[in-house]
Image: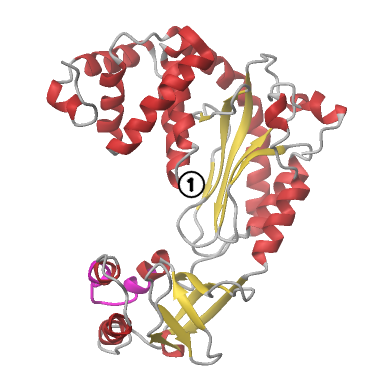
Amino acid sequence: MENSENQVNLFEHVHKDWQKKCLSYDQVFEKATKQNALVKDIVSPLNDWEPNTFLDEKNRPALRNKKTGKIYSLTYHALNGLCKTSTVPFSGVVTGMLNNGQKRETVDAELVCQYLNRNLFNPSCADLEKPLLFRTWDSDGDSQNTIRAILSTSYVVINNLWYLDILRSTIPQGVFSHWRGNADILCANLLIPDTMRQEQDSEVGGMLSIGNNEIGTGRITSLPSVFRAICMNGTIMGQQEGMKISKIHMGKIDFDNLKNIIIENLNKTIPLLSANVDTMLASKDMKINAPIDNILSLVAMENKLTKKIVKTLKENYLIEHEIIGKDVHSAYGLNAAITRTGQTLSNDQWFSFDMLAGHICSMQANSWQSFMNRANNLTEKQIKKYFALSN
């Protein structure tokens, strides 16, 4: 982001070091347009394709388009879509075949090709004439062509550039603090300029968590979020009023109507940010009165987290202790550790961790005390699943 004096004044809540990392609309559009140029959506039946003996560096199988002769590697998401077109539940078998840890040789690729022909490209197992939507990326010559998704023709692509254009026209002075977009997905945090927000606290500010997915793994979303200026950890807060935009990509979509809904949602969401900031700051008064290992073990159990993620949570909790001091011993500190961890994970996990942090911050006093009681009542066996107990 360009660091003009005007822009700095618009984002006084944002730490000056982070302002340098933020992206403007122009920068995001440049990235998204370049990536979008790779996309080619093909509507065709399975009969227009055939399994190929090529396996890419990730051991993923490939299909050859009979009309163009191009070979496309299947992403695992596309492979799952391919499985759904068949009456034979073979996805687990194929995935196991491709992930058995053995070195790939030509004979393995031939076996995969034969398996696909037998279980999918077979009129007794699948409708080979039914049109499907193949979302493909054509490489620029430096990488392999890929099929990103195989979808029903009732699936409607909501273009990321279309959504970004609405955001720019509605919040023209916004900037992106986090961006994980590509030609398939849009996953970002959009900072709201101070002139559009009501809260004046300099430690915590408001933003929007923005999402869209063009390949069938997520919805178009816009949710209120809160960040701490010092490190830009995000927290997605529940929407108490207004509208929550969450649109699936199926059936007929009136894009003019959807645009109006999105704009209305944005205009109703921004005023909520002030209350969400107050909720975040009030979470400092929700004190931790259980060992942190117990608390993180309980978070892991109730949210099905792996031991590796719990270890990262503990490390980030200690990092937050250095940053915010005694406030770490509260829901505010637990929130900070969760959101810091989420930034290291996949897009879906990042979103879910920010949602989890928002849930913790928004707990009522009785719910928080119940959470502490459950943590204190964990057994050594339950805690040992995630942490080695000291003697």
The residue that mark 1 highlights is: 347
Q: Residue at x 17, y 16 (%)?
A: 377
Q: Nearer the viewer, residue 208 or 249?
A: 208
**In the structure shown, which secondary structural element does the residue marked by tag 1 occupy?**
helix
Residue 134 is situated, as x and y percent measured from the top left of the image, at 50, 75
Residue 338 is situated, as x and y percent measured from the top left of the image, at 43, 28
Q: Let me know if residue 305 appears in the view.
A: no
Specify the farthest residue to the right.
5
Q: Is residue 325 positioned above or below 124 on the image?
A: above
Q: Residue at x 33, y 86 (%)?
A: 121
Q: Let me know if residue 252 appears in the view.
A: yes
Q: Is residue 347 left or right of residue 173?
A: left
Q: What is the crowding at mark 1: few (fewer than 14 residues within 10 Å), some, or many (at least 20)? A: some
| Magenta segment includes 83 | yes
Q: Nearer the viewer, residue 101 or 129?
A: 101
Amino acid type, residue under disc 1 in the picture: Asn
| Magenta segment includes 150 | no
- In which quadrant is the N terminus drawn? top right
Residue 285 is situated, as x and y percent measured from the top left of the image, at 45, 7
- In which quadrant is the C terminus drawn? top left
Picture quadrant where residue 183 is located = bottom right
Residue 278 is situated, as x and y percent measured from the top left of the image, at 56, 15
In magenta, the rendered stretch is 81-93
Q: Residue at x 37, y 11 (%)?
A: 365
Q: Is residue 199 left or right of residue 151?
A: right
Colouring scheme applied when the structure was drawn: secondary structure
Q: Is residue 350 positioned above or below 11 on the image?
A: below
Q: Nearer the viewer, residue 106 or 8?
A: 106
Q: How many marks?
A: 1
